[in-house]
Amino acid sequence: MRLLITGVTGLIGKSVLKAILADKLGYQITALIRPGTIEERYAAFSTELEIVKLDLADLEGLKKYLAANKFDWVVHIGALRGGRKFSREAYLRANLGCTQQLAEYCLSSGAKLLFCSSVGVFGAIPEELPATNETERNPDNLYHYTKIECEKYINQAVIKGLQAAIVRPSITYGRGDFGFPYQLVKMVDKGRFPIINKRIWIHLCHIDTITGAFLWLLKNGFPSGLALNVADREPVQLQDLSNFISRQLQGKNYCTLLKLDQIFFRWGEALAKLLKNELWVSRFQLISRSWFYYVADTYQMMGLPETFTIPAFQVTIDDYRGK
């Protein structure tokens, strides 16, 4: 059985690849890696699989490569993440164009496709809580737009006979990532994290949870077109998480003097939109509004261990400490 995987130098892709190798599923694995990627990012597993240096945005190169090779599974995790300084064309080619080609390849060859989408298809802040499969999609930034369009394309291919499943992780935390969870720890430690003066519920995803979801799909039968949100078992209050981080680092709850009215966050969000800075727009939204998802069906179907953000978030605190 041959398996093609993308995104193995990122947090989720690397963890999924390690789990596949550790579980000894017996796949002959090929990983697509962007040319110019620092070797240190994949050296740990380079001897256990075939490395092919191919940019996901190189659609002609990808088409030729797929035409010359045969795979039984395609695990598509790689993508240009949101808030990065890439052009619209780059996002469309690397995220949407690449996914379309992989879906067409799987449809024509009979390979199964596992696609890593994002809860961002509901927008940074879902219009209903908890967000479910029926929640309206919201293309509030270019990254989210590409994920929405990818899901549409895959679902259309499923109608034609494609065997595929879609998993949507929430913002994921684990060792080696320096995104929102890591920055939250850093700002709380330095006393610079602003807390809004109302209850905010957020819903993060431990890296082991999303990894377990991919591994389950590889080992079990699933209905084609399956789409599941993946996150910790329950959301957590942002104030409680800030207090937990502060207690682990400073031995006391986070200073409440930094509680601010929501107007401050609205001004910040408006300024970020004026400057067309998607990253800061989402950051202001993520810390001033609630966002959580329906995940009970994911746990029921897959039997995943129930992970709770407190105390599981200790992994990111330890990473920040350099442990």
Image (spheres, grey):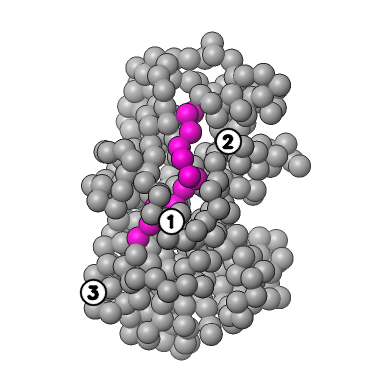
Marks 1 and 2 in Cβ contact (< 8 Å): no
Report the mark closest to the observer, 1 or 2: 1
| Residue bearing the label numbered 3 | 159
Q: Distance from label 2 to label 3 (Cα)?
A: 41 Å
**Which element carries disc 3, helix, strand or loop?**
helix
Q: As drawn, is 196 to the left or to the right of 28?
A: left
Label 1 CA crowd tier, 10 Å (few <14, some 14–19, many 20+): few
| Residue bearing the label numbered 2 | 310
Extreme residue in the right direction: 323
**Which element carries disc 2, helix, strand or loop?**
helix
Q: Is residue 280 visible?
A: no
Q: Distance from label 1 to label 3 (Cα)?
A: 26 Å
Residue stretch in magenta: 227-238
Under mark 2, the amino acid is Ile
**Mark sitting on residue 68:** none
State which tag comes first along the sequence, 1 or 2. 1
| Residue bearing the label numbered 1 | 300
Under mark 3, the amino acid is Ile
